[in-house]
Image (cartoon, rainbow, N blue to C red):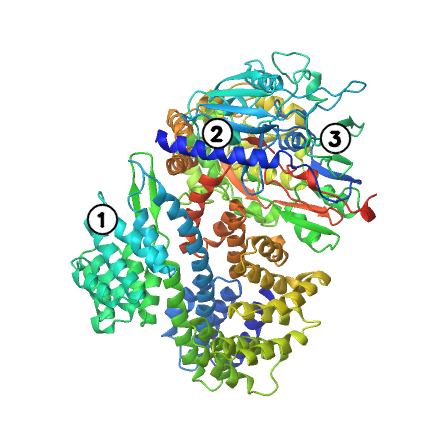
Amino acid sequence: MKQISIIVVLALSVLGFVAGESQAADLKKTTRPNGGTLSYGEYGRPATLDPITSNEMISMRLSELIFNGLVGISERQEIVPELAQRWEASKDGRTYTFFLRKDVTWHPKPGEEAKPFTANDVVFTYNIMMNPKTITPLKVRYEFIEKAEMLDEYTVQFTLKRPVLNALAKFSFKIIPRHGPSNPLYLTREDNFVQHPIGTGPYMLKNVTADREIVLVANEKYFKGRPHIDQFTAKPFADQNILTQALTFNAIDMIVLVNPRSIAEIQGDKRFILQPYNALSYSFFGYNLRNPLLADKRVRQAFGYAVNRQEMLDAFFNGQGTIISGPFAPGSWAYNLDVQPMPFNTQKATDLLREAGFKPGADGIMQKDGKKLELTLMVPIEKESEAVKRVVLAFQNYLKNIGVSVKVEFKEWQAWKENVFADHSFDIIFASWVFDDSADISSLFHSAEIGPWKNNFGSYSNPEVDALIVESKLTLDHEKRRTINRKLHALLADEAPYTFLWTLTNYSAYHKKLQHVAIHPYKFFSYADDWYIPVAAQK
Amino acid sequence: MMSRMHDIYRWGLLALLLAVVSSAAGAEDVSARALKLYEKHYYEDAGRLLRPQLAALDSASQPAARLTLGMIYLRSAELYLELQRTALVIETDYLKKLSAQKGANASRYADFYLGQALLEDGKFTESAKYLQRFSASAGVTAAYKSYANVELGAAYWRSKQAQKAGALWAAAAASTPEDKAALAAAYAAAGAQEHHPLAMADAAMDEAKKQGKPIGAHLAGNLLRAYADAPEKALDLLAANEFRGASFVEMLGQSKSISFYDPALLGDLAHAHLRAAVLYLEQAGRDPRLGNTAAYFLIDAYLLQGNAEQSLRQAAAFLAQSQLPAQYRDHASSRQAAAQYLAGKRQEANALWTDLAEKSAARPELLAEVMLSCTQASADCAKYEQRAVAATETGEGKKYFSLNAALGKYYLLRKDYAKAVLYMEAGRDKANKNKIEANDPVMLTGLAQAHYHNKKFSESLEIYFEMSKQYPAVRQIQDAMQGIYATEQRSAGDVKIF
């Protein structure tokens, strides 16, 4: 087994070396024009603008424009050099040495000279990310690293606790500057840096307007060559329907994620291009297992049988999606095709509640030991699109049919995140996860990920799931990892820490004036420095 | 593609409705319901609904019902052929990866299935190499070694080494229903009727029933192949079994299992449906009211079978009618050109395609027909391609879906996968992205293959996920693609809240 991993690591390192040498000098040689601005619509606002403290997609997309990793991933799924010019892996797969570019500078602070990027920044990023006081969901991803050391100003070495599958790709995490955060030891959401990020990427933060629009301008000194478009502006919208209107009335040039109900309308408009991209995502109702009423899996399973998912998908999203059965998206390699979604069956739901010891009270609400089955469903107000509102109201109604009272509470986005991820003061949430294609669900369901600002918000804990997750991380065998993930899928579908709902159709829409648009299915803007607007179409 | 299908459907339906006017209301209902399923591209459901009712229909309703079944199985065959082409590409890639692994936890059975896949793909020498290696390997069951020898015989037979094939087959065990079915399948595929493959298959089936054995995927796959010349038996077998299960699951310790599927299955399904299509269309064609309609579909059916002469005869009969609506005449003519090309009449074919292309100025669907039939015939389509590209650049909207899809198919076969995706995406109903009701599943299959080549695995998997609801046999493509994707994915393990 070890030998296989060594061969893989060696092969990757050789490829990386070759790619690194050939692409290091690959500055832009095209004759595509510079200029123009691009405004894109986001459904909501980012809490922070740095790549470490955030766990949401809007921030991540901005990070992709502002920051770089040591390596990147090409459209062809190849590991390509970014801040690292080349790299070497040891034969045992435990040491990775990165040789950094010497021509990279950080975005300058106002009135200051741009500072050079060095190995010091890489080590700093790793250390601050792993500091126990740093609030970040990233730690679990990098627990396999034992240490990071600066060998010289432009060479950094990572020692791994053990060889891991796909190790090189994991060094795509974004590097932040040592001179960025005010506290050099750990990063919190109170640090000025998280709202005023400094990166090495193709775009620099210019300002955040009074309307909370985030304005980025081209980094003239970008090491891959100046990006073509002068300015990117992220505009927040509270409702997806309004996003579509903004596009059709030319208030924005691009929508990152089109409301499924608007796809037909945009497809019929010759000014726009609809581009599919497959961010592996799904929506779910998540339960807080700290509430004893929800700790019994029969109760959670009952909720799963009580909701008519297909009816909701058809009615509220025009059927633009797929019902799922477990913790992976259907487009993922890890999805267990043998596990079928729970069917809509209110009788079964009621039977399960009775089996769990609940009986209907005089008011029709199920109760057990004098406790009524009354729960609070918390929904962020910024995600209060018409469709979301309908989903939560339908859920409320479905559960009412089996004698469960659900009170819906709409919360401001930041307050919602604090309630869910920090205080854990909720019973049920409606939300969606978006995954990269590693199918890594460890941060969601491993018991070590229970705690403030960690992704296992519902405090789900199951030793069998923990063991499978660990086994999946330890193996260097792809087929074994597949088998383990199939088991995890089946187990979590049965355990029902979430009611798994659906994955929706993902389309971006943009104005035809934008050229050479390639979209990363997860990070979205990875190739945006190559996008351009013909001179005649520049505003 | 979609509009073509609709046109064909409507015209067929019109003829059919005329034919059933005098039929019993019940018969009309079942045929009409089957046609509705056909229109949604639910060919499996349509066949399952109508065929069991056939015997109970009165004689007046029979021809129309047989025509409907012929149409259903024809489109089903077309789809399975496309699926088979895709499956061979993806499964071969996947099995080669598995076969290349070494060590205690490496698969012992990958070589057998890789040998089968290569055999199915016409790579007989390479196939023989893997089958021989499998037969010589340790740690595999005697039964599988015996199957491997039967398959090796098939590889020899198809590479014109009949003596070596015969020796292997003669030495093969025939003690279990599985053994018998494997031999019957090999004899049937080789056309060795002197060994009575049909009777052998029947015997295998009877024996399995007597033993109370379930018809597993491996046995069923071989029986299907053995029933090559008995379409009704093949359809009975298909009706009684679900063809999605793995042929074999190899357990490698507690935490590793690999599912293997019969690489020939999708092709066998295609051929079974195609033979059934020809059977029912020919039967329907004997009714004077439906002869022309049946001929229209038989042009395509014979062409798919590679029987260009028969296709030409049907085209001539169909086109001899006066007052044919232009679009049906053009469809038949474009297929006639393909048949001419395949029959060696290349000049005539090119003249006909050129003539049709010149008439296509305001009719992108006609140019789509030209592109599709030219691509199907593997002819030089460059001059039609130029015209088609120019047309898609000036025209937009649903009217151009079929032309974009046809161009995408053309580029797929030329291995220009970026262009294939570009055009097929333009021909896709995005408001119903993966839904086979709104998008021709043949086009979606091609698009999925192009996405696979571009390493957009999740796009491809999503298409098959939807398709598997109606066509469970695509599981083998899904499983192989998941295996490739797991190896090829490069990402850091990130997850974010939306």
Tell me if residue A19 comes above or below residue A174 in the rendering.
below
Residue B349: which disc? Answer: none
Instruction: Give the spatial CA distance, label 2 vs label 3.
Output: 30 Å
State the separation of the CA atoms marked 1 and 3.
Answer: 62 Å
Residue wearing tag 2:
A167
Residue B247 visible in the snapshot: no
Do labels 2 and 3 touch, CB within 8 Å? no
Q: Secondary structure at mark 3?
A: loop
Residue A258: x %, y % from top left: 66, 44
Q: Residue at x 28, y 44 (%)?
A: B108
Q: Chain of mark 3?
A: A
Residue A60 can be seen, yes or no:
yes
Using the image as rendered, state which of residue A44 and residue A514 is in the foreground.
A514
Picture quarter containing residue A2?
Answer: top left
Real-space Cα distance between discs 2 and 1? 37 Å
Query: As shown in the figure, which amino acid type bears the numbered disc 1?
Result: Ala
Q: Position of residue B488 (x, y in %)?
A: 48, 40
Rendered-image quadrant of the N terminus of chain A: top left
Please, what is the three-letter code of the amino acid marked with disc 2? Ala
**Callout count:** 3
State which mark lies toward you, 2 or 1: 1
Q: Residue at x 42, y 80 (%)?
A: B282
Secondary structure of residue under mark 1: loop
Q: Are marks 2 and 1 in contact (CB under 8 Å)?
A: no
**Amino acid at the residue labelled 3:** Asn
Residue bearing mark 3: A219
Residue of label 1: B136
Along the polypeptide, which appears first: circle 2 or circle 3? 2
